Every structure is written in structure tokens, then in C-alpha cells.
Image (cartoon, rainbow, N blue to C red):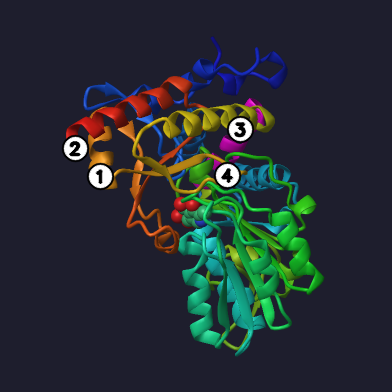
């Protein structure tokens, strides 16, 4: 059978998880002699063959630098790199390709905005609002900016179920607020935040909003124009693409005004020792040789996701998550951390007094890969008064049977400890 990546959507027989799984070579791996059950998708996803092929094709058939060469290989690579930008533009429904900046990942995208927009626009006493459920990469860049500018960080509290306190946000928003940076989906709790409403409320005060979409983009269709966000950041490797590539979307009028984040080749228009003028968007923000293979690989990942179908992915993953939530709630001593009504991709939990690392180690011996620890969200751990959690995170290539395997393995873990 042709891999699904080669089929047009109309040729596809509907969603069949076993067909999709065949497109991902890593899913046939054995770990400690057991079939791999990969439930660490919030950390990174496995890659379909079409992405591996796109990377290999770049390195074997068109390996060259972009934008500068007049030879054929360079022309091909430049074309494929720019084609990838167009794919991201369509994927996010951005207005223009210039609004798509290739960066290393979500982390670099947020640092870019903090250092370029933040350092020019924020002053002593200005306030930046984030939430208590942010990944460290949407906390630390803003703290660094506060140290540099004298701005102040304000934090929206979260409820016992792991939802943003809307009243809390309303109370924090005031005339001193100059920026809001919020995660779309929490990597530690799975909560989906009502970002459209947050953006509307911030815009009523004239405040720009950055959305950290690292955990949202793999699970739902994102339309940056419908959201009306000012910036949107995500990482390629969590969307079935390569590591070391990610996207910063920004509205043209903001990006245009922002100074470059890094200086070097490709981001200039002319250089003399007296004065350097900068290149136009998006190149102003892409100093040096970019991750060409990564961008092309991300383009292939987007093609793959679009062929499976984002609506299909969302529907299947919701069923998978519901199954996980309800079967895990049957496990005695298991406490789910984060029980928001709207959730995507993630179940975080503790099991009695067994340390999450011990649970993770035993599951690994059974071939089941989950994540244990603070998930780069230490304030979330503090909020729920736990040092760490176990986190199972799901993709459309996971099966109901894999969820059942997790549940049975947790019962065996309890027998080891009790
Ligand atoms: C919500 C969220 N934001 C940001 C990041 C950082 O992504 P990256 O390490 O790819 O830059 C992650 C990674 O786990 C995340 O889950």
C-alpha cells in the first residue's frame, strides 16, 4: 500500500491509525526487547518517512547555501527554502510570507520578540503579563527583559483544575500593561487557553499579544488572522518536523518597526564601517546561514499533516485523550494534575507516593516512553504542590491499545512498590 503521505486526501480511505503508523519508521522500534509505545509527543514527535526523505534529498541532491549562489544547486535550495515559508504561511493563514520568520524553535522566537520588540518598546514600570502555566521559555526571556528595562512581570493565576483565572487576567490588565505572552496549550497540564478572548481584551487596551503555540499547533488548526494575535511561535520538531527549526509569525506592521535581533550575513542590505542598512522582512531577522534542511523538512511535515487532515487529527486525538483520561481515572491512587474542561494532547499525573522517575524507569523497561519531571514548568509544579509529575502525551499515531498498555503497566508499577 502507498504511504498516506503519497496519497491525495481524496484517495485516502478515511483515518486508519495502522496505515498512518507505517509512515513513521521509529514506531516499529523495539525498546528493551518490547515494541515501542511512544507517549512523549509533547517533548518531541516522531518523523514520517516523507520528512526523512526531504532532509535526505536536500543533503544529497541540492546541498548548497541559499540566497547568495547563482549556481543550480543554490537556486534549487533557495527555492525549496522559500517554498517552505509559503507552506507555513498557508498553514497558519498568515497574510504574507514576510510575516513568517524561520528561527530555531519556540524558545528562540520568544527571545527574539523579547529582545527586539521588548527592548525598544518597554520602559521602567511597564508591565508584562504571562500566566502561571507557562513553559520556562515563556517566563525567563521576559524576566531577562525586566532586568534589562525595569519592566515588571505580572502572572495570571491558575485554578485548581488548571484553568486560567479570567478574573485574574482582567484585574492585572491596566494602563501600565505593555505586553501579554500566553501559552495556547499548557505542556504540563494540557489545558487549552481561551486565547482569542485574551487577545480581544488586551487589544481593547492597545496591548500586543504573543501566543506560545508549541503545544497547540500539533493538535488543532491555527488561523493567526482569525485569532488576531500579534505574534505566534511554534517548534517544528513537535509537529513531526526536524529539530532546530521553528517559526515566529508576526504582524508586518510590528515586525517592520522592530530592530534586528542578531547581526550578520543575509540580514543586511549594505555594510560600510560608517553605516549598515538592514535587509527587508523576513531576512532582517534571519542572520547567517539558516537551518535550510530544517525549513525544508518542516515544509514536508506540514504537507504530511495537511494530507492526514487537521480536522481528522483533532477528532481522533480527542477520542484518544478521552479514553486516556477515563481509563487513568480508574487507576487507584492516581491523581491527575490538570483537569481543565478544554484539554489537548497531555495527561499529567502522580501515582500515590511513588516518585515519577521510578515510574518512568519501570515503564521504560516495558517499552513505554513517557516524560517525568517538572516539564520545564516549575511554577506549575509549585502551584499543585508536587515536585514532579508523569506526563503521557499523545499523537494521532497512538492507539487506544497503547493507552491500555500504559494503564496495565501502571498497575504493575504499584505492585512493585506496595
Ligand atoms: C508550551 C511550550 N513552549 C515552549 C517550548 C519550548 O520549545 P523548544 O524547546 O522547541 O524551543 C515547549 C517545549 O516543550 C513548550 O511545550
In whole angstroms, how far apart are the C-alphas of marks 4 and 2? 55 Å
> Is the CB of the residue bearing disc 4 within 8 angstroms of ligand 1?
no
Q: Residue at x 53, y 72 (%)?
A: 262
Which label was assigned to residue 417?
2
Q: Which mark is residue 354?
A: 1
Q: Residue at x 51, y 37 (%)?
A: 240
Secondary structure of the residue carrying numbered label 4 = helix
> Which numbered disc flags the more N-terminal residue, 2 or 1?
1
- Distance from the alpha carbon under mark 3 to that under mark 2: 41 Å
Residues at marks 2 and 1 touching, judged by CB atoms closer than 8 Å:
yes
Q: Is disc 3's CB within 8 Å of ligand 1?
A: no
Nearer to us: label 3 or label 1: 1
Inter-mark Cα distance, 4 to 1: 51 Å
Residue position for label 3? 305
Q: On residue 77, which mark appears?
A: 4
Residue 204 rendering spot, x and y as whole percentages = 81, 70
Query: Residue 96: which quarter of the image?
Result: bottom right
Q: Is residue 65 visible?
A: no
Q: Nearer the viewer, residue 242 or 161?
A: 161
The tag earlier along the polypeptide, 3 or 1, is 3
Query: For the magenta stretch, what is the residue range?
Result: 293-309
Q: Residue furthest right?
A: 204
* Residue 83: % across, % down: 66, 43
Residue 281 or residue 416, whichever sits in front: 416
Secondary structure state at the residue bearing disc 3: helix
Question: Residue placed at 68% from the left, 78% from the top?
Answer: 177
Q: Secondary structure at mark 1?
A: loop
Amino acid at each position: 500500500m502507498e504511504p498516506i503521505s503519497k496519497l491525495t486526501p481524496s484517495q485516502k480511505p478515511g483515518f486508519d491509525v495502522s496505515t498512518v503508523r507505517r509512515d513513521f519508521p521509529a514506531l516499529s522500534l523495539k525498546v528493551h526487547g518490547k515494541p515501542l509505545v511512544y507517549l512523549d509527543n509533547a517533548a518531541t514527535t516522531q518523523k514520517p518517512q516523507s520528512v526523512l526523505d526531504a532532509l535526505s534529498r536536500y543533503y544529497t541532491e541540492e546541498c548548497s547555501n541559499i540566497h547568495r549562489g547563482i549556481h543550480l544547486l543554490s537556486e534549487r535550495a533557495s527555492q525549496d527554502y522559500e517554498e517552505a515559508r509559503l507552506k507555513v504561511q498557508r498553514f497558519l493563514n498568515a497574510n504574507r510570507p514576510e510575516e513568517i520568520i524561520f528561527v530555531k524553535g519556540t524558545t528562540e522566537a520568544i527571545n527574539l520578540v523579547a529582545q527586539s520588540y521588548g527592548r525598544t518598546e518597554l520602559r521602567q514600570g511597564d508591565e508584562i503579563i504571562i500566566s502561571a502555566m507557562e513553559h520556562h521559555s515563556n517566563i525567563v526571556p521576559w524576566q531577562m527583559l525586566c532586568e534589562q528595562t525595569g519592566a515588571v512581570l505580572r502572572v495570571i493565576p491558575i485554578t485548581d483544575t488548571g484553568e486560567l483565572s479570567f478574573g485574574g487576567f482582567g484585574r492585572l490588565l491596566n494602563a501600565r500593561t505593555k505586553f501579554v505572552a500566553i501559552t495556547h496549550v499548557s505542556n504540563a497540564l494540557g489545558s487549552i487557553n481561551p486565547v482569542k478572548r485574551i487577545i480581544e481584551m488586551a487589544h481593547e487596551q492597545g496591548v500586543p499579544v504573543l501566543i506560545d503555540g508549541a503545544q497547540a499547533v500539533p493538535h488543532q488548526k491555527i488561523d493567526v488572522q482569525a485569532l488576531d494575535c500579534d505574534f505566534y511561535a511554534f517548534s517544528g520538531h513537535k509537529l513531526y518536523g526536524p529539530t532546530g527549526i521553528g517559526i515566529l509569525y508576526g504582524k508586518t506592521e510590528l515586525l517592520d518597526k522592530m530592530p534586528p535581533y542578531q547581526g550578520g550575513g543575509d540580514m543586511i542590505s549594505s555594510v560600510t564601517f560608517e553605516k549598515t542598512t538592514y535587509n527587508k522582512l523576513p531576512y532582517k531577522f534571519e542572520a547567517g546561514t539558516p537551518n535550510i534542511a530544517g525549513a525544508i523538512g518542516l515544509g514536508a511535515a506540514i504537507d504530511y499533516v495537511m494530507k492526514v487532515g487537521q480536522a481528522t487529527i483533532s477528532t481522533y486525538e480527542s477520542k484518544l485523550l478521552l479514553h486516556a483520561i477515563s481509563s487513568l481515572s480508574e487507576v487507584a491512587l492516581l491523581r491527575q494534575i490538570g483537569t481543565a474542561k478544554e484539554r489537548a494532547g497531555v495527561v499529567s499525573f502522580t501515582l500515590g507516593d511513588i516518585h515519577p522517575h521510578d515510574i518512568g524507569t519501570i515503564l521504560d523497561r516495558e517499552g513505554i516512553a513517557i516524560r517525568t519531571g517538572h516539564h520545564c514548568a516549575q511554577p506549575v509544579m509549585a502551584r499543585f504542590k508536587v515536585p514532579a509529575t508523569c506526563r503521557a502525551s499523545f499523537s494521532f499515531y497512538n492507539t487506544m491499545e497503547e493507552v491500555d498498555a500504559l494503564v496495565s503497566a501502571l498497575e504493575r508499577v504499584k505492585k512493585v512498590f506496595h
